Image (tube, rainbow, N blue to C red):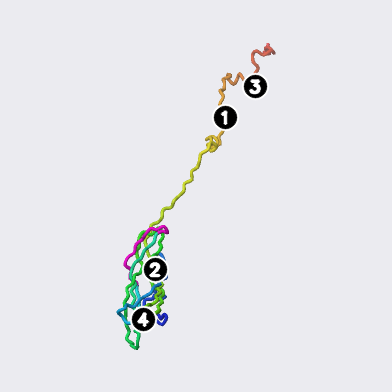
Amino acid sequence: MGILRNSIDITGISLEGELPRQIRGDFSEAYDTSYLFIPGNRPRPRAISEISMSVELKEEKIINSPAGKIAILDGVKNIKVTYLPVGHSRRRINVLLALPFNTSVKLPESATDIEDINIYIADAYFQLVEGRKIYSYIYYILDVDYPHKPLPIEVEEEETELHDTDIIDEREILNIEFPDMDIIEDKGSPDEELPEKTHPYPSDDSEDGDDGLE
């Protein structure tokens, strides 16, 4: 037995424990609102008792659009309708319907391929509108897993202009003063530059004359 919705026993809705606790790739939602029709070669329905459904994925591809990378998913939704025909008969009639399933999932720019896709039917609602026409609403949760490559990181290089004021003399960097080098002339021996008082003994040419003993 499935989930009772609008007095219809629906099989195929994922239970809360069956939904993913952690999204592996990219998470998306899809809503499918349409009408189902009982074929004309079958008795007209009086009341719907059961519906079972499943989704079979047939093809997927990635396209580059102005909005970015998008995964296109195509497949088939299989729906079996069990109903009671018009009249007093209690015989149940089953009708199998294979209808197109199409949706899309937006992917990041780093996605390169699709590895795995899980489709969960989170909710569904059906109602016999009139005659052979049945209102159908299905809510899907899609988990698309994909490999991705890291995007290149663009590094902006700053250009610096070299001005004349930026040129520094290497002498300023070393903090060394280079004095002006003058040529020093040779002015004789050091003895000639010393004053007379620096000689310990008077010279022979002294004006005091000879003080020797007679």
Disc 2 from disc 1: Cα separation? 84 Å
Q: Position of residue 174 (x, y in %)?
A: 54, 37
What residue range appears in magenta?
55-68
Q: Is residue 199 left or right of residue 45?
A: right
Dot 1 corresponds to which residue? 179
Label 2 to label 4: alpha-carbon separation: 25 Å
Q: Is residue 57 magenta?
A: yes
As measured in the structure, the alpha-carbon distance from the residue carrying label 3 to the one carrying label 4 is: 137 Å
Q: Which residue is mark 2?
A: 142
Please say if the residues under marks 1 and 3 sit with CB atoms less than 8 Å apart: no
Residue at screen point 39% across, 58% down: 65
Quarter where residue 171 is shown:
top right
Residue on which disc 4 sits: 50
Prevailing secondary structure class for the magenta stretch in the rendered image: strand
- Residue 9 position, x and y percent, is 38, 81
Residue situated in front as seen by the camera: 15 or 60: 60
- Which label's residue is closer to the chain start, 1 or 3? 1
As helix, strand or loop, the secondary structure at mark 1 comes to loop
Q: Amino acid at mark 1?
A: Pro
Residue hosting label 3: 198
Lower sequence index among marks 1 and 4: 4
Q: Can you see residue 63?
A: yes
User: Residue 146 sits in which quadrant?
Assistant: bottom left
**Mark 4 residue element:** strand
